Amino acid sequence: MKKNNKPVILIVDDKPANILALESLLADKERILLNATSGEAALKIILEKNIDLIILDVQMPDIDGFEVAQILKSNKRTKNIPIIFATAESKERHMMMKGYDEGAVDYLFKPLDPEIVKAKVKVLLQIQLQQKELLEKNLSLQKSELLINNSADIIGIIDATSFKIEEINYAFTAILGYSSEEIKGTALPFFLANEDRVLVNELAKEKKERLVFETRIYCKDRSIKWLQWNVVVKDGKWFANARDITEVKQVETIRKYLSTVVKQSSDAIYIYDRQGKIISWNDGAEKIYGYSEQEALRMNIRNIIPPYLEHEMEDTTSNVLNGIRVEAMESRRITKHGKLIDVVFSAAIITDSNREITSVAITERDITEQKLADEQIKLLHANLEANILQLESSNKELESFSYSVSHDLRAPLRALNAYSSIIETDYMQEMNDEARELMKKIQANTLKMGVLIDDLLEFSRLGRKEVRRTRINMQAMAEGILREIEKTNQHHAAIKITDMPDANADPALIEQVWINLISNAIKYSAKKQQPEIHIGANTSINETVYFVKDNGAGFDMKYVHKLFGVFQRLHAVDEFEGTGVGLAIVYRIITKHGGKIWADAKSGEGAAFYFTLPG
């Protein structure tokens, strides 16, 4: 049965009109669109069919979109299906972050923008299908690796100077009959016939990167076997693969023509004489080329060689006849129907009883499909890289946009501040107490908004700032920052700084981390009668964990996932002032260094912030 490669999109919405609108936008003959009007119906479809993309409404009566996403992400088969949430709710960050926490990769906001919907679905489908194809290719590679690891051929590592055998596979012991202990540490020539010992020594002197040769080898029971060696020479070692060709040699000696096994091979195996006339043709050759054995035996080798490759074939034949063995060489051939195919072939001479060369044996494999598959993999990689670059470009544009917007907000703030100052100066005497109080609130909020913009600008700059690492004396830095804070912030906290090891990081960025964490500790412990703050580090073999601990207000750990988000506050503004950006800046700096940051706290008992920096 032909495999269906069309991507499948599931649209989930309790309103049929919304489903119809999305189906109209996404209709394409190269896609399959499914729909469900409830969370339960959607889950049933997803468990029965292979879905490539889900567009999921957030607000549904039975199970909402977030709950459906939670169920999908808990299932091994469905956890990697990309989800786009469709919602008419506010675009505030905390709502969006909830969706991303539940597994969303993007949002569509109602009313829908057709162009945005099409673009997002197209890109996500393309990435999802590329990932599926890469997973299939990786699975195929893993299977190939298992086949190699269970090879019946001898595989081993041999010292290129002393010829001592260092590493072997099971086939080594199975073919030779010796135990692993008897083989390891023994020089290869010990097992070889006298003539082949000379051959191996001569080959070693040639200093080639790749060696191909045949030897006779004595087994433990004193029987002799023929091995065909393929050796890669690197770093003073022979990485050797040896195939037992004893039976092949026996067939060449006794029969001088292809055996029944060879005739039934799926690879093309044929023989031609010194004049190029084909004298043997197996079933694999008939399958690949389309010529029957009867037809092929009336042909010359040139009948299956493209004209522009005739010189290559003549050179190959000449090399083989001169005793040069050809292994795994790629070329092209022509079939009976005129189709050009890619092949990989090996060539060897056949001699008669007097050791006179009589013909050339060719073994070929059709690799046309394999070559096409390789090209498709390259194209998929190229497309994936292009999509990654496009995503990186979009992120940079978004950062630039945020930066510009933050700058543009300053102009109305300056005007508001200036006008309020004029009113206060010129009309203060005419104002009643309530008007004066309102004027103070306007000026205070203007100042607060200015601080918020400054924090946003700092957060935006961090996305583009390059990390310049150098050695930092962390203890000296923390002590210096504390002195600066105490000049402008009078507090009564007992602050202890214990020994800390140096770190390899960007001094300007890490200074901002210490400022934010220490300032927060002072702020949130200020209402305690005996506030205490501890700054230090815990060092183990693997890493150093820096920390700032306080016995202040703390927070409920069930909200810890919100802690490092922009504008995420776990305390009321009238309780503790702030913009909700400071910890987001800390998080971005630490992760930009490749480190980790986390917190532990309990409401009313204090909080501890920990971070690591890679060495």
Image (cartoon, grey):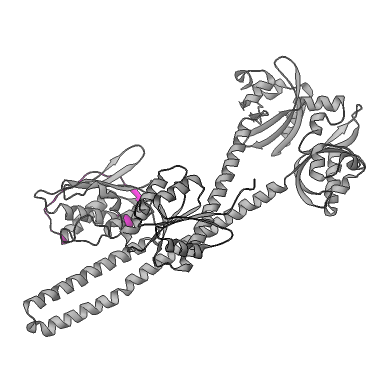
Q: Quadrant of residue 382?
A: bottom right
Give the answer, above or below, for where 484 lies relative to 229.
below
Q: In what quadrant of the picture does the N terminus appear?
A: top right
Q: Position of residue 80 (x, y in %)?
A: 46, 48
Q: Quadrant of residue 266?
A: top right
Q: Is residue 366 visible?
A: yes
Q: At which x and y percent is residue 533? A: 18, 48
Given residues 106 and 365, the one toward you in this image is 106
Q: Residue at x 30, y 47 (%)?
A: 598
Question: Residue 505 magenta-drawn?
Answer: yes
Q: Is residue 185 above or below residue 212?
A: above
**Residue at image coords 68%, 46%:** 370
Between residue 122 and residue 512, name the one nearer to us: 122
Q: How many marks?
A: 0
Report whether 167 appears left or right of 522.
right
Q: Which of these two is toward me, 455 or 487?
A: 455
Task: Specify whether residue 443 is painted magenta.
Answer: no
The residue range painted magenta reads 488-511
Q: Residue at x 28, y 68 (%)?
A: 453
- Whether residue 506 appears in this view of the structure is no
Vertical placement of 208 versus 436: above or below?
above
Q: Position of residue 451 (x, y in %)?
A: 24, 67
* 211 relative position to 85: left or right: right
Which percent across, then down, holds residue 578? 21, 61
Q: Nearer the viewer, residue 339 or 384?
A: 339
Q: Looking at the image, which residue sits at the far top?
A: 221
